[in-house]
Amino acid sequence: MTDRELDAAGITDPALRDAYTRCRHLNARHGRTYFLATRLLPSARRPAVHALYGFARWADDIVDHLDDGATPTERRAALQRLQRALETGLRDGHSTEPVVHALADTAARYGIDPRHFTDFMASMRDDLVVTDYATYEELRGYMHGSAAVIGLQMLPVLGTVVPRDLAAPHAAALGVAFQLTNFLRDVGEDLDRGRIYLPADLLAAHGVDRPLLRWSRDTGQRDRRITEALRAAEHLTRGVYREAAPGLAMLDPVARPCIRTAFVLYGAILDTIAAEGHAVLHRRAVVPRRRRAAVALDGLARVTAARLRAGGAPSQKGAAPAALLCPASTGKALLRPAGTGETG
């Protein structure tokens, strides 16, 4: 299947094919939900999904999974090496680092603004030193680089039926919505890493602070104040989904089923969190397999209908002539599978 995708994308150079293949393996191994959603895209567009995911995964691993014994200094040095490789790769169009090589090729094919990658790296560096966000506005500043720019990176790949500038705010909002969903789902895991990604003022409005969260996580005991704060975070996140929703109809019709599938699956995570009483400090919310299967089948039906309307051939309107991507927002959104119980 890899060869067919690379052939469809017009990627013929052996070293470049190997680079994309490595990224594809990262996607298949660490982001199985995203890997499945990617398959709703035309074959020619899939390698770009893997390239963007592979790069984001690599950076996130440096921050959180480089080595259990790695010091902040070592992680910072590794990010700096990746930053230099990124800058060189984007400038020269190739790199000796396979993941950067594939990313640079994708960026060139689709004319992706280099600033989106620079902003992403800035947020990755923040994760080495920032453990709390006082306000939602502060958190949005972080999420611009870790989530919003992921949506903006993907727009040229997905293609639009309106001027890209009109779709961009909705794409950015979708990245933020996905990441806020992950922040809510992963409160306990992030707390164990020493981080809280929910705004301190939102928590404080319900009488919640870090010690109370830590107590609940450690003892398994629940507290009404925490439940109310998490419910408020859920409502905040649903509001961002509403901001993002109009953008779905702005995408190339053959890309919409992929994005809609991710949109519905991430919304289902919020539904599961609410149905389980916002007990995210004590267990990971997992969307039932039956619902995920139903969403995937609906996406497949929509893909078939879109391709039939396009005359049996994938539409390329608004996209460059070869490869593509499916969203989610990293830093922590693009990289974490959508409610499957997988680690990422």
Image (spheres, rainbow, N blue to C red):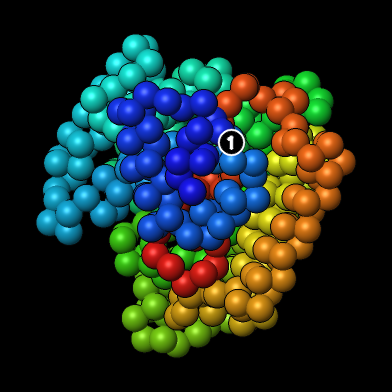
- Residue 241: percent from the left, percent from the top? 72, 51
In the figure, 62 relative to 211: above or below?
above
Label 1 residue SS: helix
- Residue 307: percent from the left, percent from the top? 79, 43
Say left or right for 98 vs 104.
left
Determine the image quadrant of residue 129.
top left
Q: Residue furthest top?
A: 92
- Residue 170: percent from the left, percent from the top? 72, 37
Determine the image quadrant of residue 176.
top right
In the figure, 253 relative to 161: above or below?
below
Residue beneath disc 1: 45
Pick the residue in front: 199 or 113: 113
Q: Quadrant of the C terminus?
A: bottom left
Say left or right for 172 vs 46.
right
Q: Residue at x 36, y 86 (%)?
A: 219
Say left or right for 16 vs 106.
left
Pick the residue in front: 197 or 275: 275
In the figure, 204 relative to 318: above or below?
below
Q: Residue at x 44, y 36 (%)?
A: 51
Q: Residue at x 38, y 46 (%)?
A: 57
Say whether residue 260 is visible. yes
Determine the image quadrant of residue 120.
top left
Pick the residue in front: 102 or 211: 102
Pick the residue in front: 187 or 94: 94
Q: Residue at x 42, y 46 (%)?
A: 24
Kind of residue at badge 1: Arg
- Residue 297: percent from the left, percent from the top? 72, 65
- Badge 1: how crowded within 10 Å, few (<14), some, or many (20+)? many
